[in-house]
Image (cartoon, rainbow, N blue to C red):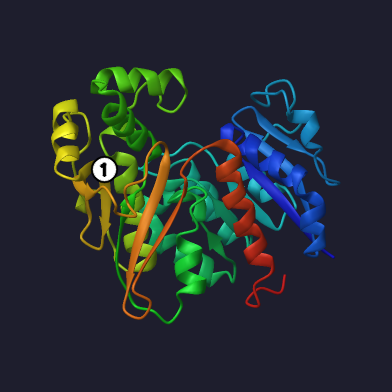
């Protein structure tokens, strides 16, 4: 039985999900030979530490670690001082400078700890640098949850499509935009009404710009460009148009001509924009679903879909990445 000591950095929606998935799947993980223990949880209030493993039930009702944290250290200090094998970094995303996640990931990798993250910011800002730090220290950096949530896109390419040349990837990478456009099409809602509904349901943030202006999708395009195509792309290299100006009339006209309008990200062309998608296309998914079509030289075009967001859904991708690290022949410890 391999003991895996995890430091969880970030205790928001995804952090809660990680604890819950580890709790639910503890027996299943042990059947794979992995004894996963979350030995520390950190947020801006401090760090909770238990070398025997933190009971997720203890934190089930807590929104933050305020009044619970028992170590007066946060961030990089916690990564340095806690005896762990792997860091799960799930602090909020900032694609301008990547902090604080960038510093956390650098510290963990430099300390010889594997990293699994759902935080797009550090990878948008410094993917090639972080991959180099991981290689120099003989550890792994995994980031499936940064691009498609539950949609197994990166692992599919790296494992199942190995030997194929990836010619292009295009798809829907933002569930909020897809939900808004779906509701506008189905119910003839205006953009503002569909957005308000999405906000009421918790699908869209109070400030929706990150999603509806295409910023989130562009960040994912950068990560795919650099990780799959070996590029050195930056956010500024992506041509981005969001969905604010799409009208019910435009959606209806497209429908009458056999199309949907969807916000599509494309790699390696580095574009994000609303595009016409044939109604019978595999890309014509609705609601909050994400979808990606991968064009290859040997296997043709392969399409994968899945939920793009959610606490448990994102955490499931994180735990899958952890399992892949410790079941890989490349890693002995």
- Residue at horizontal 57 percent and vertical 43 percent from the top: 313
Position in image of residue 290 (x %, y %): 40, 46
Q: Which residue is mark 1?
A: 263
In the image, 42 versus 29, the foreground residue is 29
Q: Is residue 176 left or right of residue 242?
A: right
| Quadrant the N terminus occupies | bottom right
Residue drawn 29% across the image and 47% down it: 218
> Residue 62, image x and y in percent?
70, 23
Q: Secondary structure at mark 1?
A: strand
State the residue at coordinates (29%, 63%). Answer: 232
Q: Is residue 52 visible?
A: yes
Quick check: 163 above or below 17? Answer: below
Residue 44's quadrant in the figure?
Answer: top right
Name the quarter where the C terminus is drawn: bottom right
Count of all numbered marks drawn on residues in the image: 1
Direction from residue 95 to residue 188 in the image, left or right = left
Q: Nearer the viewer, residue 124 or 192?
A: 192
Image coordinates of residue 177 in percent, x first then y, are: 32, 35
CA neighbours of label 1 inside 10 A, class few (<14), some (14 to 19), many (20+): many
Does 325 sit above or below residue 50? below
Residue 35 in view? no
């Amino acid at each position: 039985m391999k003991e895996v000591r995890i430091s969880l950095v970030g205790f928001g929606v995804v952090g809660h999900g990680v604890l819950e998935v580890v709790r639910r799947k503890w027996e299943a993980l042990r059947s794979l030979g992995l004894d996963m223990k979350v030995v520390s949880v950190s947020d801006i209030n401090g760090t909770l530490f238990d070398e025997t493993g933190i009971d997720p039930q203890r934190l089930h009702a807590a929104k933050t670690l305020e009044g619970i944290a028992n170590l007066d250290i946060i961030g990089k200090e916690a990564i340095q001082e806690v005896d762990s094998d792997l860091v799960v970094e799930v602090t909020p995303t900032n694609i301008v400078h990547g902090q604080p996640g960038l510093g956390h990931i650098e510290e963990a990798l430099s300390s010889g700890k594997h990293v699994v993250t759902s935080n797009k910011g550090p990878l948008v800002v410094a993917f090639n640098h972080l991959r180099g730090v991981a290689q120099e220290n003989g550890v792994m950096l995994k980031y499936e949850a940064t691009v498609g949530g539950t949609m197994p896109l990166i692992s599919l390419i790296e494992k199942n499509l190995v030997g194929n040349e990836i010619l292009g990837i295009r798809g829907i990478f933002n569930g909020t935009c897809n939900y808004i456009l779906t509701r506008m099409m189905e119910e003839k809602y205006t953009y503002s009404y569909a957005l308000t509904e999405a906000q009421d349901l918790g699908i869209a943030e109070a400030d929706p710009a990150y999603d509806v202006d295409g910023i989130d999708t562009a960040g994912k395009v950068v990560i795919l460009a650099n990780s799959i195509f070996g590029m050195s792309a930056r956010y500024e290299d992506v041509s981005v148009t969001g969905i604010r100006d799409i009208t019910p009339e435009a959606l209806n006209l497209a429908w009458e001509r056999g199309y949907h309008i969807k916000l599509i990200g494309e790699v390696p062309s580095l574009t994000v924009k609303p595009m016409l998608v044939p109604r019978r296309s595999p890309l014509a998914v609705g609601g909050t679903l994400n979808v990606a079509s991968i064009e290859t030289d040997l296997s043709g075009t392969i399409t994968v879909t899945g939920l793009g967001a959610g606490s448990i859904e994102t955490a499931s991708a994180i735990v899958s990445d952890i399992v892949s690290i410790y079941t890989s022949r490349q890693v002995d410890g």
